[in-house]
C-alpha cells in the first residue's frame, strides 16, 4: 500500500502543478485580471521569444554526437508518421462532414509538446527531462507542421505550395532556435555568460506564462456544438494515440526516462497551434477549439493514470 501511494504521489507531482496553473489562468480570466489582449500578447511572447530561448539553451547543453538519444528522436518521428497515416485512413470512414476530417486528424496526432509536454517532462525528470526532450520537441514540431498542412489541405481542398510550406517551416521560431542550438552544440562554441543568463531569464518565463495563457484561453461555451467529432478526436488523442506510442516504445526496449518522454509527450493535449492553423486555413474553428479545451483538461487525468501504471510496473 505504501509503495502504491508513493507511485500515486509521483504521478500527481507531475500533473498536479499543471492543473493548478491552468486553473489559476481560468480563474484570473473570469476575475478580469487576464484579458484577451494579455492572452494574445503572452502567447505570442511565449511562441516567439520565451519558448525558443528555452529550447535553444536546452539543446546547446546536449552534445548531440555523444549524449543525445537519437534512437528516441527516430522513434518519435517514425511513430508520428505511422499514426498520421492510420488516422488519415480512419478519418475517411469515420468523420463527417468531409471538410472536418483534417481538423480531427490534426487534433488527434498533434500534441502540445512545447508547453504541456515539456512541463510534464520537467516535473517528472527535472533538468535531465528538459535536456532529453528538447531535441525531440524540435524535430517533431517540424513533422507536425508538415502533416498538419497536408491533412487540412486535403480535407479543405486547398493547395499549399511547397515553397509556402517550406517558408512556414524555416521561419518557425522554435525550429530556428533548434537549428541554431544544434550549430552551437556541434561547433563546441562556448556562449558568453551574460547571453546564457539573459536567455535563462526568458526561458524561465515559458511554462508559467504559457500555462496561464492556456488556462485563460479555454472556452467551454461551444462544447455543445460539434459534440460527436469532438468526443471522437478527444478519445483518440487522450487514449489511443498515447497507448500506441507507449506500446511501440516498450516493444522496442525503451525504458526509464526515454519511455517516460515518449508517453508524456504523446499524452499531452492537442496543441493550441492546431486551432490557429485551422482558423487560418478557413476550417471549422469551433471544432478545433472544442478539442483543445477537452483534451487539455482530460490529459491531466489520463496522464496521471498512465504514469501510475508505468511507474507501478517499474518501466518509467
Image (spheres, grey):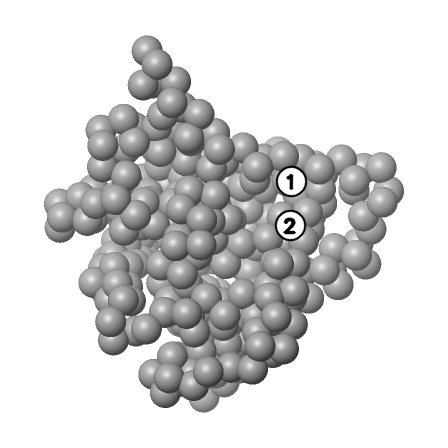
Q: Position of residue 291 (x, y in %)?
A: 53, 44
**Mark 1: which secondary structure?**
helix
Determine the image quadrant of residue 198: bottom right
Q: Position of residue 212 (x, y in %)?
A: 68, 47
Q: Residues within 10 Å of mark 1 (few under 14, many from 20)?
A: many
Image height of 215 relative to 284, above or below: above
> Does any portion of residue 281 appear in the rendered image?
no
The single residue placed furthest to the right in the displayed view is 32
Horizontal side, residue 169 vs residue 33: left or right: left
- Count of marks placed on residues: 2
Q: Which residue is drawn at the image coordinates 25% and 44% (left, top)?
A: 256
Disc 2: which residue:
208
Q: Which residue is drawn at the image coordinates 32% and 73% (left, top)?
A: 63
> Does any portion of residue 211 appear in the rendered image?
yes
Q: Residues within 10 Å of mark 2 (few under 14, many from 20)?
A: some
Label for residue 21? 1
Name the N-terminal-most of marks 2 and 1: 1
Q: Position of residue 231 (x, y in %)?
A: 47, 36
Q: Position of residue 311 (x, y in %)?
A: 29, 31
Circles 2 and 1 in contact, beta carbons < 8 Å:
yes
Query: Toward the viewer: 253 or 39?
Result: 253
Q: Which residue is drawn at the image coordinates 68% and 66% (left, top)?
A: 45
The single residue placed furthest to the top in the displayed view is 1
Horizontal side, residue 153 vs residue 242: left or right: right
Image quadrant where one finds the C terminus: top left
**Mark 2: which secondary structure?**
helix
**Distance of label 2 from label 1 (alpha carbons):** 7 Å
Query: Toward the viewer: 240 or 189?
Result: 189
Amino acid at each position: 500500500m505504501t509503495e502504491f501511494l508513493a507511485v500515486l504521489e509521483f504521478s500527481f507531482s507531475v500533473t498536479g502543478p499543471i492543473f493548478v496553473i491552468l486553473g489559476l489562468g481560468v480563474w484570473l480570466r473570469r476575475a478580469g485580471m487576464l484579458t484577451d489582449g494579455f492572452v494574445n500578447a503572452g502567447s505570442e511572447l511565449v511562441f516567439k521569444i520565451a519558448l525558443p530561448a528555452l529550447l535553444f539553451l536546452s539543446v546547446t547543453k546536449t552534445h548531440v554526437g555523444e549524449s543525445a538519444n537519437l534512437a528516441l528522436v527516430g522513434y518519435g518521428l517514425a511513430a508520428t508518421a505511422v499514426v498520421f497515416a492510420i488516422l488519415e485512413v480512419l478519418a475517411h470512414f469515420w468523420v463527417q462532414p468531409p471538410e472536418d476530417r483534417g481538423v480531427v486528424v490534426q487534433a488527434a496526432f498533434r500534441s502540445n509538446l512545447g508547453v504541456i509536454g515539456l512541463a510534464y517532462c520537467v516535473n517528472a525528470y527535472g533538468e535531465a527531462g528538459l535536456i532529453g526532450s528538447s531535441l525531440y520537441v524540435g524535430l517533431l514540431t517540424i513533422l507536425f507542421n508538415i502533416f498538419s498542412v497536408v491533412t487540412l489541405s486535403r480535407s479543405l481542398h486547398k493547395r499549399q505550395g511547397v515553397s509556402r510550406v517550406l517558408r512556414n517551416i524555416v521561419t518557425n521560431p522554435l525550429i530556428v532556435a533548434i537549428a541554431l542550438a544544434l550549430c552551437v552544440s556541434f561547433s563546441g562554441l562556448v556562449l558568453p555568460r551574460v547571453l546564457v543568463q539573459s536567455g535563462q531569464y526568458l526561458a524561465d518565463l515559458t511554462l508559467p506564462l504559457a500555462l496561464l495563457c492556456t488556462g485563460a484561453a479555454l472556452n467551454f461555451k461551444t462544447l455543445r456544438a460539434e459534440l460527436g467529432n469532438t468526443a471522437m478526436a478527444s478519445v483518440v488523442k487522450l487514449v489511443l494515440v498515447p497507448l500506441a506510442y507507449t506500446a511501440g516504445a516498450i516493444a522496442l526496449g525503451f525504458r526509464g526516462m526515454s519511455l517516460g518522454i515518449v508517453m508524456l509527450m504523446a499524452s499531452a493535449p492537442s496543441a493550441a497551434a492546431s486551432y490557429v492553423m485551422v482558423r487560418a486555413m478557413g476550417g471549422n474553428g469551433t471544432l478545433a477549439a472544442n478539442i483543445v479545451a477537452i483534451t487539455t483538461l482530460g490529459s491531466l487525468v489520463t496522464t496521471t493514470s498512465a504514469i501510475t501504471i508505468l511507474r507501478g510496473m517499474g518501466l518509467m
